[in-house]
């Protein structure tokens, strides 16, 4: 994942983060910064050595601190993105544990249903992070919700078939 910010003082700041490992790379004006530790980079601008510290990550939101100046690189996650993920998780946990609701439309709840809905909830939140428009974020959420619903329904039918 890659984010680019143009700063009036430092120029183009490019932030890269590996989706799988979380490894971060940073460059300023095309000059790659040397990784000192997991979140600390150094930059030699010719006059002095500048320490750059990265806070956060791509999903949560990332900032860099250069000489006591904080620069937002990746926007913070929005409250409604988190709320949609939690709503999805809570829906399946509650519906799957209420017998009257499962009699109308059976879905797996508990640990299995919670796990499936948590996977799709987290996947939806991460995917929504890449969308700019709110209506696209809602489409992603509906697709993730539908996929979780279909899997939990299929698991419930499979379990009921085996038990009966």
Image: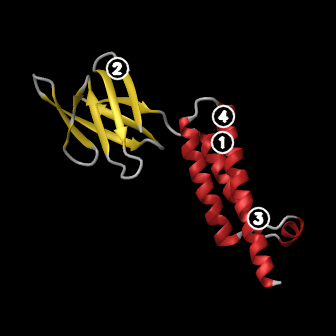
Image location (x, y in percent) of residue 20: 40, 52
Q: Quadrant of the N terminus?
A: top left
What residue lies at 32% left-to-right and 26% top-to-bottom? 13
3 and 1 marks in contact (CB < 8 Å) = no
- The quadrant holding residue 120 is bottom right
Q: Residue at x 74, y 58 (%)?
A: 149
Position in image of residue 50 (x %, y %): 18, 31
Instruction: From this view, report whether residue 85 is shown above or below residue 161.
Output: above
The residue labelled by disc 2 is 7
Q: Are marks 1 and 4 in contact (CB under 8 Å)?
A: yes
Camera-near label (3 vs 2) is 3
Disc 4 to disc 2, C-alpha distance = 29 Å
Instruction: Specify few, some or many for label 1: CA neighbours under 10 Å numbering under 14, 14-19, or 20 or more.
Output: some
Say the numbered circle drawn on residue 136. 4
Q: CA distance from mark 2 to mark 1?
A: 32 Å
Q: Is residue 17 left or right of residue 44?
A: right
Q: CA distance from mark 4 to mark 3?
A: 25 Å
Image quarter for residue 5? top left
28 and 162: which is toward the camera: 162
**Residue assigned mark 3:** 153
How crowded pointer 2 is (Cα within 10 Å; few <14, some 14-19, many 20+) is rated as: few
Q: How is the image coloured?
A: secondary structure
- Mark 4 or mark 2: whose residue is earlier in sequence: 2
Q: As rendered, which of 154 and 17 lies closer to the eye?
A: 154
Q: Within the image, what quadrant is residue 147 found in?
A: bottom right
According to the picture, the residue beneath numbered tag 1 turns out to be 140
The disc, 3 or 2, on the residue closer to the chain's N-terminal end is 2
Label 3 and label 1: CA atoms lie apart by 20 Å
Task: Report whether 36 appears left or right of 104.
Answer: left
Labels in figure, total: 4
Tell me how far mark 1 sits from mark 4, CA to CA: 6 Å
Is label 3 in a helix, a strand or a loop?
A: helix
């Amino acid at each position: 994942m890659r984010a680019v910010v143009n700063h009036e003082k430092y120029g183009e700041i490019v932030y890269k983060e590996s989706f799988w490992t979380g490894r971060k790379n940073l460059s300023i004006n095309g000059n790659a910064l040397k990784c000192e530790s997991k979140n600390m980079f150094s930059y030699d601008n010719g006059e002095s050595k500048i320490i750059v510290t990265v806070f956060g990550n791509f999903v949560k939101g990332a900032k860099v601190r250069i000489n006591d100046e904080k620069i937002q690189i990746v926007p913070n996650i929005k409250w409604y993105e988190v709320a949609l993920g939690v709503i999805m998780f809570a829906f399946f946990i509650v519906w799957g544990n209420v017998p009257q609701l499962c009699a109308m439309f059976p879905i797996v709840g508990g640990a299995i249903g919670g796990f499936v809905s948590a996977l799709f909830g987290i996947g939806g939140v991460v995917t929504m992070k890449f969308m700019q428009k709110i209506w696209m974020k809602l489409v992603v959420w509906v697709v993730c919700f539908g996929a979780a619903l279909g899997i939990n329904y299929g698991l419930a039918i499979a379990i009921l078939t085996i038990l009966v």
